[in-house]
């Protein structure tokens, strides 16, 4: 698959795309290059588009079931790509990873009981805890020598007062791909404190070819570990708007506890188009994904190289995800001033780091999932704004 596949610009403005059509509401102007919302500007794999078109040709879109072929495609994908053999009975199909965070808080922690997150982290990790009336426990990551690390001693202290850990693996926004020894340490702490771990592995397929491999937490877990893993094809194949993901829950009681939370809200109906895209991605999307990763790695390297030559901003070069975490503390601006600088001087729409928690103060998140031409324009604008 050629580079031209991803160099091709797909017009998105006017299509109802949040990333483009919400610019005025979010940034106060639509005259910014949008590098914020975590979807990509690339056309979805042709195999998915064909499968959706074929399904659309059937003129009845009634209540649907998940076919066994969908489960098989998912199991085949994780066995072949991640050496993870998933049991069919352990899979629970759900509307998305974010609803799963809420369901896990409700199922595994009581009102006022502690739930641990590791900021800076994806904002719904916060809202899932706060909106369900659970108690937020922060175990901040440590930035050491330009690379984020787990604070395991602090995690141990938090675990003594918690029921649930929400783990982001690979981590959004800092781009870390946790190594087997780090995962082992997390599991050991969880085991000692009878802590349930929900591992959000939605970016599992998006690990750069020159970096480490993603290790599913389930591959390091023992049979007695209280583990739930959230996975989805949405980031892998750029179909997040279709809203279908899976939970892998080996323990039947925990599986039933989660299912009860979704049943309570009556949100487990199957959308025939979501199911079609889910299966087609896992069955046919491998070559497209491999080409995508090469392209994204080129974008990542471009950002790191350009910003290494200018003062004030340091790019964290991610090991996984298509998100670059920019350390802007060298500019000497507060968070409001930093946001104004990117919008009004650089003409860029990025995610403010402060939205990922207090540990994100002074940072910005940049989405690498766009054409190289648009990324180069964004970098040119940023470098020019820094020079002025």
Image (cartoon, rainbow, N blue to C red):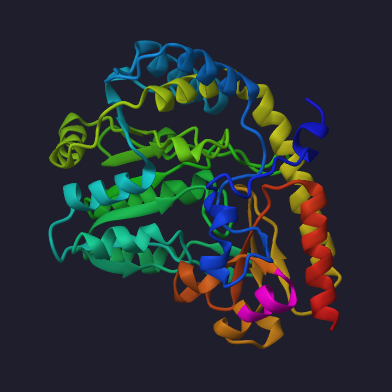
Magenta stretch containing residue 343, yes or no?
yes
Q: Residue at x 51, y 20 (%)?
A: 52
Q: How many marks?
A: 0
The quadrant of the image that shows the N terminus is top right
Residue positioned 84% across, 84% down in the render: 388
Is the magenta region chiefly helix, strand or loop? helix
Residue at x 53%, y 77% (from the top left corner): 361
Residue at 20% x, 59% y: name it. 132
**What x and y, as percent, mark residue 365?**
60, 63
Nearest the viewer among 58 and 250 is: 58
Residue 157 in view of the camera = no
Q: Depth check: give the residue in front, 115 or 222.
A: 115
Q: Is residue 303 visible?
A: yes
Q: Position of residue 94 (x, y in %)?
A: 31, 34
- Across and down, in percent, residue 304 comes to 78, 60
Which of the 4 quarters of the picture holds residue 317? bottom right
Q: 108 left or right of 175?
A: left
Magenta residues, as a range?
A: 340-347
* Vertical side of 353 occupied by 149: above or below: above
Q: Horizontal and vertical percent for residue 11?
A: 69, 43
In the image: residue 8, left or right of residue 13: right
Q: Is 363 left, or right, of 245 in this rendering?
A: right
Residue 80 magenta: no
Relative to 259, say whether 115 is above or below. Answer: below
């Amino acid at each position: 698959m050629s580079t031209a596949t991803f160099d091709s610009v797909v017009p998105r403005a006017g299509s109802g795309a949040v990333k483009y059509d919400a610019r005025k509401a979010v940034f106060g102007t639509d005259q910014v290059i949008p590098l914020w919302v975590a979807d990509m500007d690339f056309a979805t794999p042709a195999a998915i588009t064909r499968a959706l078109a074929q399904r659309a040709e059937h003129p009845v879109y009634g209540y649907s079931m998940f076919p066994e072929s969908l489960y098989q495609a998912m199991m085949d994908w994780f066995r072949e790509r991640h050496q993870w053999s998933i049991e069919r009975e352990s899979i629970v199909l759900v509307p998305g990873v974010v609803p799963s965070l809420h369901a896990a808080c409700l199922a595994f922690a009581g009102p006022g009981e502690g739930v641990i997150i590791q900021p800076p982290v994806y904002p719904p990790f916060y809202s899932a805890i706060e909106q369900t009336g659970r108690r937020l426990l922060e175990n901040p990551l440590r930035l050491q020598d330009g690379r984020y690390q787990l604070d395991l001693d602090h995690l141990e202290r938090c675990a003594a007062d918690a029921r649930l850990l929400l783990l982001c693996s690979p981590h959004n926004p800092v781009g870390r791909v946790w190594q087997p020894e780090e995962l082992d340490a997390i599991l050991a702490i969880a085991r000692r404190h009878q802590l349930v771990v929900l591992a959000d592995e939605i970016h599992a397929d998006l690990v750069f070819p020159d970096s480490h491999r993603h290790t599913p937490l389930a591959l390091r877990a023992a049979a007695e570990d209280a583990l739930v893993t959230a996975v989805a094809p949405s980031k892998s194949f750029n179909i997040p708007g279709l809203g279908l993901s899976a939970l892998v829950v080996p323990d039947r009681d925990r599986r039933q506890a989660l299912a009860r939370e979704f049943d309570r809200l009556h949100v487990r109906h199957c959308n025939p188009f979501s199911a079609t895209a889910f299966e087609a991605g896992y069955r046919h999307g491998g070559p497209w994904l491999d080409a995508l990763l090469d392209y994204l790695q080129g974008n990542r390297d471009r950002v790191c190289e350009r910003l290494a030559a200018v003062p004030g901003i340091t790019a964290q070069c991610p090991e996984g995800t298509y998100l670059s975490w920019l350390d802007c503390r060298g500019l000497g601006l507060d968070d409001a001033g930093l946001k104004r600088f990117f919008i009004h001087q650089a003409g860029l729409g990025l995610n403010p780091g402060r939205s990922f928690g207090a540990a994100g103060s002074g940072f910005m998140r940049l989405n690498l999932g766009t054409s190289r031409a648009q990324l180069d324009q964004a970098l040119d604008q940023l470098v020019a704004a820094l020079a002025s």
